[in-house]
Amino acid sequence: MTWDPFFGAVPIDGGTRFRVWATAARDLHLHVRDTSGPSTHQPVRSPDGMWEIDVPDVEAGARYAYSLDRGSEPRPDPASRFQPDGVHAWSEVIDPRRFQWTDEAWRGLDPATLVIYELHVGTFGSHGTFTEVAARLDYLRSLGVTAIELMPVADFPGRRNWGYDGVALFAPSRAYGHPDELRALVDRAHQTGLGVIMDVVYNHLGPEGAYLPQFSPEFLTAKHATPWGDAVNLDDTGCDRVRHLLIENALHWVHEYHADGLRLDATHALIDTSDRPFVAELTRLVHEARTPRPLVFAEDHRNLADMVMEPSRGGWNLDGVWADDLHHVIRSAVAGDTHGYYVDYTGTAHELADTLRRGWLFVGQHSRHEEGPRGTDPSQVEMRRSIICVQNHDQIGNRALGDRLHHAVDSASWRAAVVLLLVAPMTPLLFMGQEWAASTPFLFFTDFEPELGRKVVEGRRREFRDFPEFASASAAERIPDPQAEQTFEASRLRWSELGAPRHSASLELHRALLALRAEYPALCASDAYDCDANALDETTIMIRRSQDGAQFVVCVRLAEGGHVNLRDALDGTSWHTRLTTEDAPFAPDAQPPRIDLVRATIDFVRPGAVILQGKESKETIPSP
């Protein structure tokens, strides 16, 4: 499909075409500063509030801004492609055609082999730039992941932010580098064999620097309420232009940056009562944008099967949805969490088996946390469409101290959880640094103007009052100040840790499991509708996977040591031990389980996992 962007400053032959949606303006003016000096221009208004003008000789690098009415302060373009001096300053004309791509041989992502590595550009290294991420791509490919997911890069106020307070939706943050440096990152990723998924936020704008509603108040609607205030307008007066702008934003990442997929943030907050579900419409247009077909994922806690079912069955055809239930069950099992949404989980192996068999746990039963039914039946949803993790930015950063799962549990339990993640038939996601059990937290951080920042700090500490360890005012002071630069700095990965024994052991386990997954389709994400998973007791689960003649039985014990009988699982096949979490490369203080394949038993000394590989045989296991 030919890419012909509608919104923003678009270079054309002999100049630049400027278009801006500004229903609030009565007398809009365009201001330009380039090598020929400053100039002011009067765009032409259309009946629906679009303003347009072609300005000759204006090239990439020129700065520009709009005055909504005569004499008003110039404001940045809501569809700006770059804000070199911040989200409150003038915009810069960018020509994406100038970048020389070299990824013609790239064939896109295969959903069956997809392994996602989520990272935050600003804290991925000591500099926090696109260029720094590009320098680590060989490492990531050798780890065994197949795609990186960049947390939102749309520009935000200040020098640091998670990205979910973005306000310049089309402009990669100047804190991370120039747009062409993001393009170079994607190009290099494709050369390395990695796809790139962009995390995008359409359910709200950040609280500072959000000029889009000032240009067109119709961008928001009081018809629906969200945690961020009025909802983005997808079904009220003026919604057609809002939907057009957001879908063009999605397509711009695909066309101008060669993104291989999008992760749509908090789609449950994209409230849409129209006959054309916005998320379904966006998904279809992104799928049709180019070959290889980009993928579309959603973060959505509702467990709605329709979102990931094919249109022929009435679905929206998303390629996957973040399925949090597995994370919550595992965290309940190994860390004992009970507050917040963990109140819905018991953490037993039986609950874990139910989650693995279905793709998610809640299929319509009552949720104490939601105070009502949650979820729908996923029995006709391919397992690969559930995106699972044992940690991600939310599940770490929304904790008061930003602590990771491996900070809260012993190494043996951590290794067991990692095996579960990487042998399950769903699509796994790793969060940056988890592969080496990074010592650093991932804290919540912002850089808002002082008064807003003060409110954010107060709100953050108020949020955790219901947790006993932070109930008192003095205890709440232990919660790091999101506005403090040291909070941001503490969240940076420390790459020097990789060589330390404890960290290198975790890294080797991740590498070994991902290598197995890459070698055997039987261990990849599955098109099947269920998983052969069974609880052997309250703390032990068995998963059986097979394809193309390869067979695996994975036994995972999440708590303490104990005796496990696998007779029913191993009957009729000759088996050998392929991997245990107590193997020397993975456990510096190894305490190997006693595995008796004749009797089909395993005696675990402590939590852990055993992967058995079999081959077809007419022999049966003899009686003990």
Image (tube, rainbow, N blue to C red):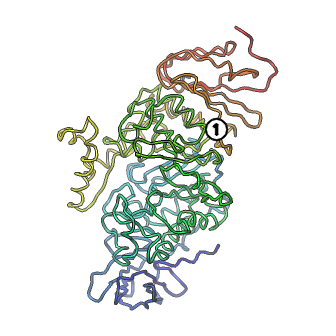
- In the image, 67 versus 215, the foreground residue is 215
Residue 524 higher or lower than 219, as above or below: above
Q: Which quadrant holds the C terminus?
A: top right
Q: Which quadrant holds the N terminus?
A: bottom right
Circle 1 sits on which residue?
517
Residue drawn where x is 66% and y is 16% of the image: 600
Report x, y in % for residue 537: 55, 22
User: In the current view of this chain or complex, which residue is farthest to the top?
Assistant: 624
Residue 48 higher or lower than 251, as above or below: below
Residue drawn where x is 56% and y is 41% of the image: 143
- In the image, 275 versus 78, the foreground residue is 275
Quarter residue 44 falls in:
bottom left
Report x, y in % for residue 66: 35, 82
Quarter residue 261 falls in:
bottom right
Badge 1: few (under 14), some or many (20 or more) residues near its Cα, within 10 Å? some
Residue 613 higher or lower than 344, as above or below: above
Report x, y in % for residue 61: 43, 77
Hey, what amino acid is under mark 1?
A: Arg
Quarter residue 618 falls in:
top right
Q: Is residue 519 left or right of residue 252?
A: right
Q: Is residue 526 left or right of residue 590?
A: right
Q: Is residue 578 left or right of residue 471?
A: right
Residue 362 higher or lower than 87, as above or below: above
Residue drawn where x is 54% and y is 29% of the image: 350
Question: Would you say residue 139 is visible in this rendering?
Answer: no
Report x, y in % for residue 239: 46, 74
User: In the current view of this chain or complex, which residue is farthest to the left?
Assistant: 474
Residue drawn where x is 72% and y is 26% of the image: 614
Question: Would you say residue 488 is visible in this rendering?
Answer: yes
